Image (cartoon, helix red, strand yellow):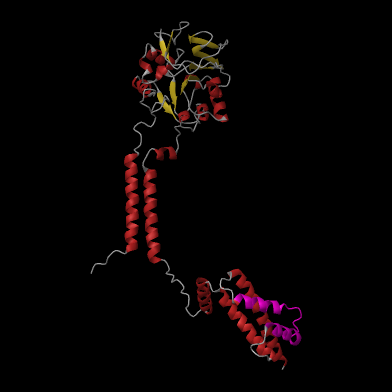
Amino acid sequence: MPLGIAPSDKKLMVIGGALLFLMLAATVIFPPPSDKFNSPVPSTYSSSPAGAAAAYRLLARLHYPVRRWENPPTELNVEPGPNSTSEFTFDPGKTLLILAEPAQSPSAKELAALQNFVEKGGHVLFTGASLRNYFPKAHLSDEDPKPTLESFSPNLPCMLTRGAQKITIQPLAYWSRPNSSQLAIYGDLNSPSVVSWQVGRGQILWWAGSTPLTNTGITHDDNLVFFLNAVGNWSPNAPYKIYWDEYFHGERRSLWSYVQKTSLAWGALQIALLAFAILFSFSRRSGPIYIPAEISRLSPLEFVDTLGGLYERAGAASSAVSVSYARLRSVLTRQLALASNTPNGQLAAAAEQRLGWKQSALTSALQTAEVATRTSKLPSREALEVVQKLEEFAARLHVRAQFQRENT
């Protein structure tokens, strides 16, 4: 005969099914974006209008030695040599690093590494307004540029301007009065938009914006020719090894960065939920069974609780006082061998003389109790005080009787 499913197990299955449905619904409603880098950042991974995927792929198609750089700049200063164990070796004089509008600021070590790289002969193509965060000696103007595309003509003939008589850039900043080591290539001489800056044995080429290398901007005017001139070797030596930085765009080479691009994290979460459900169901079936303790109906306090509850519901506080009052009078009259109808005053006077209860306030207690027994709506707190006082006198009589039996 097949066994049915217990109600508790049905409840657990319903909860598990609901959680599974919510996870599936979240996967459908919140799918991962088709383009992770659909942002204004000119990343080589982005095919959005402001991205730089087209320029990067063009260099690869033209057989330029280009690759993405997702390592910290501290690894740019590995000197070539027969004993080098690093994956990368650099000759700074033959290396070009492209920093296209980097979004994250460098640390102190990374800042020193970039400066050292350029001073040893490295070349940097930098675009955007954050140049001073990477090379603090840069002189960028505080003037806010217009958020529109602007066309610029070259100020002098050179390898960078060859075939690029008109370029279009959307400036994010302007240079402020170049000095002797800085050459204004395009734009106004006092606030140029393209500057060549000699630093040590190396060189920094700065653009006011990334338009000439973006997916849409590369087709404007002579931007394509200008871009190819900028990434080509500026000297007649061998072509540059081009490293297009993605490290400062947030791409970091690590195990976690790889895992983030896969569904491994969601898979681990589902496995964890499944393991928790298995352990929970196993513990419910295999754990120790505890039987809740039952309160005995023979408990001595049950009668007291029941009687007190009856008095409370009935509002009969005076009845409780009557019980204690009658009990105390009964004990006193037997102890003192007096008649049961002896007035309270005489009963108290006899107790003071025979029992030694001087100034015991017994008279007041008896009279108060007598009045309380005739009160129809006696407050509970007042009744409690009267009963406590009467019980104190009754307890003193019990102690005295026990002392007399021990002496005999």
Q: Position of residue 193 (x, y in %)?
A: 48, 13
Examine the structure image and report whether residue 362 is included in the region drawn in magenta.
yes
Q: Quadrant of residue 338?
A: bottom right
Quarter occupied by the C terminus: bottom right
> Residue at 38% across / 11% down in the picture?
222
Q: Does residue 192 sit above or below 10 in this rendering?
A: above
Q: Residue furthest left?
A: 1
Q: Does residue 174 sit above or below 393 in this rendering?
A: above
Quarter occupied by the N terminus: bottom left
Give the left or right position of residue 250, taking residue 335 as reference: left
> Residue at 65% across / 82% down in the picture?
394
Q: Position of residue 351 (x, y in %)?
A: 72, 85
Give the left or right position of residue 57, taking residue 299 as reference: left
Q: Position of residue 315 (x, y in %)?
A: 53, 71
- Asked if residue 385 shows in the view, the reply is yes
- Asked if residue 238 shows in the view, the reply is no
| Segment colored magenta | 344-372
Which one is nearer the viewer's eye here, 295 or 216?
A: 295
Q: Does residue 389 sit above or below 84 in this rendering?
A: below
> Residue at 33% across / 40% down in the picture?
29
Q: Position of residue 169 (x, y in %)?
A: 43, 15
Which one is nearer the viewer's eye here, 175 or 334?
A: 334
**Majority secondary structure of magenta residues:** helix
Examine the structure image and report whether residue 40 is included in the region drawn in magenta.
no
